[in-house]
Amino acid sequence: MAELATIARPYAEALFKATSADLNGAAVWVEALQEIAKNPQLQQFADNPNVTNLQVFDVIAGVAKTALPDMAKNFLRTVIDNGRLSVLPEIAEQFQVLKNAQSGSSDAVVYSAFDIDSAALIDLKATLEKRFERKLNVSVQLQPDLIGGIRVVVGDEVLDSSVKASLEQMKMVLTA
């Protein structure tokens, strides 16, 4: 959604500038707030006109697994006071993009039908970094419907070597 991105951009840029001294530390609490803000029940609670901004802040701060630093609390108050809680996940994504751009890296999601052990993941990361020609922050998500193999998403680039993709290609060839 272009609208959400437009609304989120100034918040992400301001947060990036304000936390430039400790971007990695900020990334941890920004991601935690992002996950909390994605909860539909929280969004419904926050949209209730009988609920105050302070109550919304207290619920989010109470749900957070670790104590939020003062910077996080101030940021969260600003987002809530401006009625932008629903935009918080997009703010967090844009913040991550800015952080990655500064470090010259990208986020990579590896979808796999099976668990990948740490040694194989290290090898896979090295191979993917050569293939995509940049440093990657790799995360793995299980997706059993791939049947086998992996599917890698880096930004808008996709590398799909899954069995499911191979079967789809075979199906297209056979039905053409």
Image (spheres, rainbow, N blue to C red):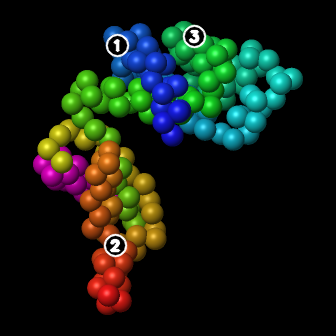
Residue at image position (28%, 51%) is: 157
Please state which of the two labelled residues, at mark 2 or mark 1, is closer to the viewer.
Answer: 2
Q: Is residue 63 above or below residue 77?
A: below
Crowd band around label 2 with a 10 angstrom C-alpha radius: few (<14), some (14–19), many (20+): some
Residue at image position (49%, 19%) is: 11
Q: Is residue 17 above or below residue 2?
A: above
> Mark 1 or mark 2, which is nearer the start of the sequence?
1
Label annotation for residue 89: none
Residue at image position (55%, 14%) is: 75
Q: CA distance from mark 3 to mark 1?
A: 16 Å
Crowd band around label 3 with a 10 angstrom C-alpha radius: few (<14), some (14–19), many (20+): few
Which element is circle 3 on? helix
Circle 2 sits on which residue?
165
Circle 1 sits on which residue?
20
Left or right of 88, for residue 105: left
Q: Is residue 132 above or below residue 57?
A: below
Amino acid at pointer 3 = Asn
Give the image location of residue 173, x and y in percent.
Answer: 29, 85
Amino acid at pointer 1 = Ser
Which quarter of the picture shows residue 84?
top right
> Mark 1 or mark 3, which is nearer the start of the sequence?
1
Q: CA distance from mark 3 to mark 2?
A: 46 Å
Q: Which residues are magenta?
A: 116-131
Give the image location of residue 113, x and y in percent.
Answer: 40, 67
Residue 128 lies in magenta, yes or no? yes
Q: Is residue 165 above or below residue 41?
A: below
Which element is circle 2 on? helix
Circle 3 sits on which residue?
74
Give the image location of residue 23, x and y in percent.
Answer: 36, 19
Residue at image position (45%, 24%) is: 9
